[in-house]
Amino acid sequence: MDKDFVFSDKDDLVFHIYKMLDNPTLLKVQKSLYFLWAYYSGTYGNVDKSEETDFDQTNYPANLFKPEFEAWKYGPVDDKVYAKQKSGLYPKDKWKEYQPKTSEEVEVVSFINDLLSQINKVNDFGLVNRSHEDESWSNPFKSTHGQQHAGMDPDEIRKEYGKLVD
């Protein structure tokens, strides 16, 4: 596990998401990436290392992967992943479950799989509607007046989800 990211190569997680979802549409994969990053950053990525917690012996990276989300009409999107999706660079024969290498990764992959099982039960536009509830999406999107994509601030996402899980 990289000290900054659980997944230094975001594609490892994307291939895992494709493998774990029953119907991995463009929207569902994009919203999965967003919610995984958001909930991870609000929990494991938000642990105050200076406080004594149950996570004392564990050093989780602050980020699941490098966040590069933009506010699009249908919610948060990672444009680089989206471009690869549209280009067919995540073919079905490459989908594979990520195999954790450390005890920390085992815990994180369990967290990911639990969240993906919940995401799997929600249809695409249910996920879009849920993501539209987030101020970290709505504030930048409103500033574009619906015309273009706007960058989303990872720190705002982390703060918002840190409050959700408190």
Image (cartoon, rainbow, N blue to C red):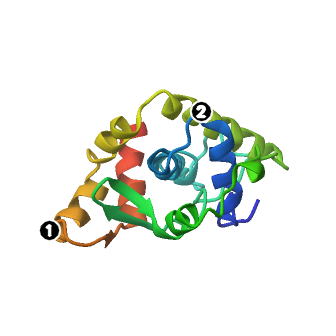
Looking at the image, residue 55 lies above or below residue 144: above
- Residue 92 drawn at (x, y percent): 70, 49
Looking at the image, residue 141 lies above or below residue 125: below
Q: From this viewpoint, which residue is outermost toward the right?
A: 101
Residue 144 in view: yes
Q: Label 1 amino acid?
A: His
Q: Label 2 amino acid?
A: Asp
Looking at the image, residue 69 lies above or below residue 45: below
The residue identified by callout 2 is 22
Residue depicted at x 59% and y 33%: 22
Q: From this viewpoint, which residue is outermost toward the left?
A: 145
Give the tally of numbered discs.
2
Identify the image quadrant of the C terminus: top left
- Residue 11 drawn at (x, y percent): 67, 61
Residue depicted at x 52% and y 63%: 86
Residue depicted at x 34% and y 35%: 126
- Residue 99 drawn at (x, y percent): 82, 45
The residue identified by callout 1 is 145
SS state under label 2: loop
- Residue 108 drawn at (x, y percent): 68, 43
- Judge left or right: residue 150 versus residue 91: left
Mark 1 neighbour class, 10 Å CA radius: few under 14, some 14 to 19, many 20 or more? few
